[in-house]
Amino acid sequence: MKSRPTGRLQTVRGGFKMGAPGLTPPLLCQRVIDMQLRMRIVAGLFCCSLIGLNCVRGEDAPSAPASATASTNAANSSDAGSTPKESQQGKNVVLWISTDGCRGDYVDRGETPYLRSLMDHGNYSRQLTPIFPSITFASHSTEATGVPAGMHGVMSNKFYDMTVGQEYNLPSDPHLLLSEPIWQTATRQGIRCAVMDWPLSQGEDKLPPETPKAAYYNEKFDTKLSDADRLQKLVDAYRKDFENPENKQPLQLLMGYGFALDHIGHQDGPESEALTKTLRETDGVLEKTIGQVCDIFKEHMHPEQGDKLYILLTTDHGMETVEKLVSLKHLMGRWGIDPDPVRAVWSCSVANIYLNDVPGPEREKVKQSIIDNLKKADCLRFWTREELPEKWGYNNPNRTGDIVVCLNSGYYFSNHDYPHEMPVTADPKTLKGMHGYDPEIDPKMQGFMMLYRWGSDEPGRDLGRVDTMQIHPTVAKLLGIKPAPNATATPIDPLP
Ligand SMILES: [Zn+2]
């Protein structure tokens, strides 16, 4: 007999606070750090998921704590009509939580009883397939906007824009997102949203006044919060929102994020005992979060009159075991050239090589030299910008490198000074897990996804492969709105 997941009432620690200090810019996904960098980074820890990347030019990542607030957007917080208790009939509410780095097969390890209970009655996939590259900022931006990286412009955790001459590392500037994310799509069509900690969701107040903004968002990303505390902010915002009599319409899209699994997957590897432990903890955090949202929904909405609560769980990519380390500078034949007008920006296992600073007359010669050197390496594939596979949609005229390199599975960039590939055991402090690999080649880049209608006793259904570009149109369909103009993928079918 399969049990129906329940929404257990949990004690809420602390309330939703306005103006909470101590938030910092978002860092996500592995910051692939060499030893020295690692020692310099606070406790050397988070970061993978947070600390994202590294580049041959060697910039550091983020970032001193800055004060910030969890903002409300009063302009979007009310609407004509009566109170939520009186008016919300037949409304769908979507709770969408992204668990960074949740590989598709993790749910088969016997450590996630709560997720398994949702699978008994929900539509799920172990093959949520990211766009290229399978890297946090690019993948989350695709899920939010429904378009590939070349169109939304967030090429990776770290990238360069040739027109403005600016390099971005785990950016938090919402201007960088060149396509409309779902929280703006929904708000534009009268749906109230709360989006907490989603990459590129911070600082919406910096956008032009005419841009539709979520009712709740963070100004900065607080790297120090646990997943439990991070998601609690979302729960508390949902609860508090019902207490404000000025809010005539309920929140219908709640978006949250956690990265503990990704962090441990990088640090200790996807097959480690530490990951197993984190998997158990994450299952508990999701149960508590979802349980609280279910209770709030039951208290304030009207399921008996057709209101529905959908639980959408997604991830941005899977995780692969790192076996060998390579030096991009050596692979390019550019080791020892300093300063080097060739800008190579890498994150995870993908690099963009920009040649716009190389003087015009020398550019083709330098490009050919790099190509000739890369051809000698059997640990990678590479493409010139013009040769990139069209299906990837990775070609952005200003932000895609002249050459794009993708390492083969199990390889990982390092800044160490050695000309040949090295076994990962040569550096016991390097990261043990990585992603970014071509998701069409490496199935371990596929993630777990779940769509469950609260209270459903329908049998669970394995959807097989689902592409991340389908998520935005699916959420739009659940909310009864039109997806953003370029988000043309087919919604998940069937919906539970
Ligand atoms: Zn990561």
Image (cartoon, rainbow, N blue to C red):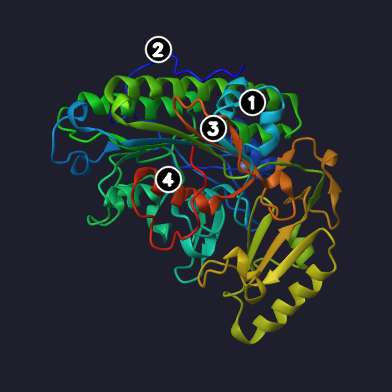
Q: Is mark 4 within 8 Å of ligand 1?
A: no
Residue at x 39% of width, y 24% of height? 293
Q: Amino acid at mark 2?
A: Thr
Residue that numbered label 3 is attached to:
122
Q: Amino acid at mark 4?
A: Val
Rounded to the nearest angstrom, the CA distance separating label 2 from label 3 is 26 Å
Choose the circle earlier in sequence order: 1 or 3: 3
SS assignment at label 3:
loop
Choose the circle earlier in sequence order: 1 or 2: 2
Would residue 441 be found to the left or right of residue 358 on screen? right
Camera-side mark, 1 or 4: 4
Residue that numbered label 2 is attached to:
11
Choose the circle earlier in sequence order: 4 or 2: 2
Residue that numbered label 1 is attached to:
279
Tags 4 and 3 in contact by the CB under 8 Å rule? no
Choose the circle earlier in sequence order: 4 or 3: 3
Residue 276, quarter of picture: top right
Q: Amino acid at mark 1?
A: Leu
Find ligand 1 in the image and state its quadrant: top right
- Residue 339 is tagged as none
Q: Where does the image place residue 292, in percent across and percent down from the top left?
A: 40, 20
The relative height of residue 170 versus residue 451 in the rendered view (above or below) is below
Camera-side mark, 1 or 3: 3
The relative height of residue 479 versus residue 398 in the rendered view (above or below) is above
Would residue 198 be found to the left or right of residue 57 on screen? left
SS assignment at label 2:
loop
Choose the circle earlier in sequence order: 1 or 4: 1
Residue that numbered label 4 is attached to:
475
Is residue 67 visible in the rendered image? The answer is no
Camera-side mark, 4 or 3: 3
Q: Where does the image place residue 311, in percent across and percent down from the top left?
A: 46, 33
Rounded to the nearest angstrom, the CA distance separating label 1 from label 4 is 26 Å
